[in-house]
Structures are given as structure tokens and as C-alpha cells.
Image: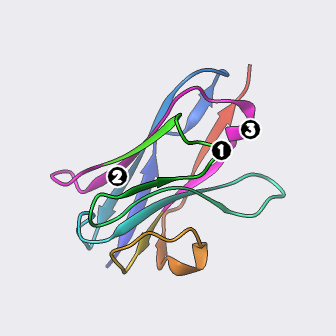
């Protein structure tokens, strides 16, 4: 059974950092594409970052240079390191599994989602 569990969210001040984790079970994270998405209140879910089976990484323009996606194959976990956070980064963050090798920015292309973790950036 494919399952994803996010953790690491919380309240952080502007300019701060958080590292989100996405622990996977039922499949190997190095065999497939894993994406991070976020959804703020009243807004559509948007793609933030993705890592493909072949280690290609992608970032939305709004987070490029501040966020880093990585993968620990031994722990079967994907991480999202978030630096220089701003209030605009406040959202529920989800990781998602895609039964394919390549990344996609469309949420509809992902098969399984975690429960989400809340990130709040506020002073």
C-alpha cells in the first residue's frame, strides 16, 4: 500500500527556515517522481518542487533559490528544505507520489497524497 506521511511544518518567523519530510512506504522513492505542492486558504493547489527518478529537480519561480528538494534512499524519505521564508509561503504543504519517472506540475498527474503539514510564516 502506497502511503506518504509529511512532517516538519510549524510556525516560523519571516526569514526563518524549516525542513519538511515526506516518509514513504509501499514503494521506493528513488524509483518514481515525488512532488511537493502547497495550498493556501482560498487558493488552488500549486506545485512547489519535484524530484524525478533520475534526480532532476524542479522548482516554481516563487521558491527558486530558497527551497531545496532532496531524497534519502536509505530512509525512503524526500525532504524540502525551505529557507528565507516569507508570509507568502504560508500554506498546507503536501507531498505526492506519481507512478512515473518524470515530474509534472499538474496535481492531477499524481496518484497518492500525504495528509499535509501546515507551514505558517508570521512574526
Quadrant of the snapshot with the C terminus: top right
Distance of label 3 from label 1 (alpha carbons): 9 Å
Distance of label 3 from label 2 (alpha carbons): 23 Å
Q: How many C-alpha atoms fall within 10 Å of the one at disc 3: few (<14), some, or many (≥20)? A: few
- Mark nearer the viewer, 3 or 1: 1
Do the CB atoms of the residues marked 3 and 2 lie less than 8 Å apart?
no
Which element is circle 2 on?
Answer: strand
Q: Does residue 113 appear left or right of residue 5 in this picture?
A: right
N-terminal-most mark, 3 or 2: 2
Which element is circle 1 on?
Answer: loop
Quadrant of the snapshot with the N terminus: bottom left
Q: Is residue 93 magenta?
A: yes
Q: Position of residue 19 (x, y in %)?
A: 44, 36
Q: Specify the label residue 88 is tagged with.
A: 3
**Where is 31 relative to 70, above or below?**
below
Distance of label 1 from label 2 (alpha carbons): 20 Å
Q: Position of residue 27 (x, y in %)?
A: 25, 72
Q: Nearer the viewer, residue 96 or 6?
A: 96
Q: Position of residue 96 (x, y in %)?
A: 47, 66
Q: Nearer the viewer, residue 87 or 41?
A: 87
Q: Specify the label residue 78 is tagged with.
A: 2
* Residue for point 15% across, 52% down: 74
- Mark nearer the viewer, 1 or 2: 1
Q: Which region shows up in magenta? A: 71-95
Residue that lies at the very extreme toward the right in this rendered image: 42
N-terminal-most mark, 1 or 2: 1
N-terminal-most mark, 3 or 1: 1
- Residue ID for mark 1: 62
Q: Nearer the viewer, residue 87 or 56?
A: 56
**Where is 11 relative to 80, above or below?**
above
Amino acid at each position: 500500500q502506497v502511503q506518504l506521511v509529511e512532517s516538519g511544518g510549524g510556525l516560523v518567523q519571516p526569514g526563518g527556515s524549516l525542513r519538511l519530510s515526506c516518509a514513504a512506504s509501499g514503494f521506493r522513492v528513488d524509483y518514481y517522481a515525488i512532488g511537493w505542492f502547497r495550498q493556501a486558504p482560498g487558493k488552488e493547489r500549486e506545485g512547489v518542487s519535484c524530484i524525478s527518478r533520475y534526480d532532476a529537480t524542479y522548482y516554481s519561480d516563487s521558491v527558486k533559490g530558497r527551497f531545496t528538494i532532496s531524497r534519502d534512499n536509505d530512509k525512503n524519505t524526500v525532504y524540502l528544505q525551505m529557507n528565507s521564508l516569507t508570509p507568502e509561503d504560508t500554506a498546507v504543504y503536501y507531498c505526492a507520489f506519481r507512478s512515473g519517472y518524470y515530474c509534472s506540475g499538474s496535481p492531477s498527474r499524481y496518484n497518492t497524497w500525504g495528509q499535509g503539514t501546515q507551514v505558517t510564516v508570521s512574526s
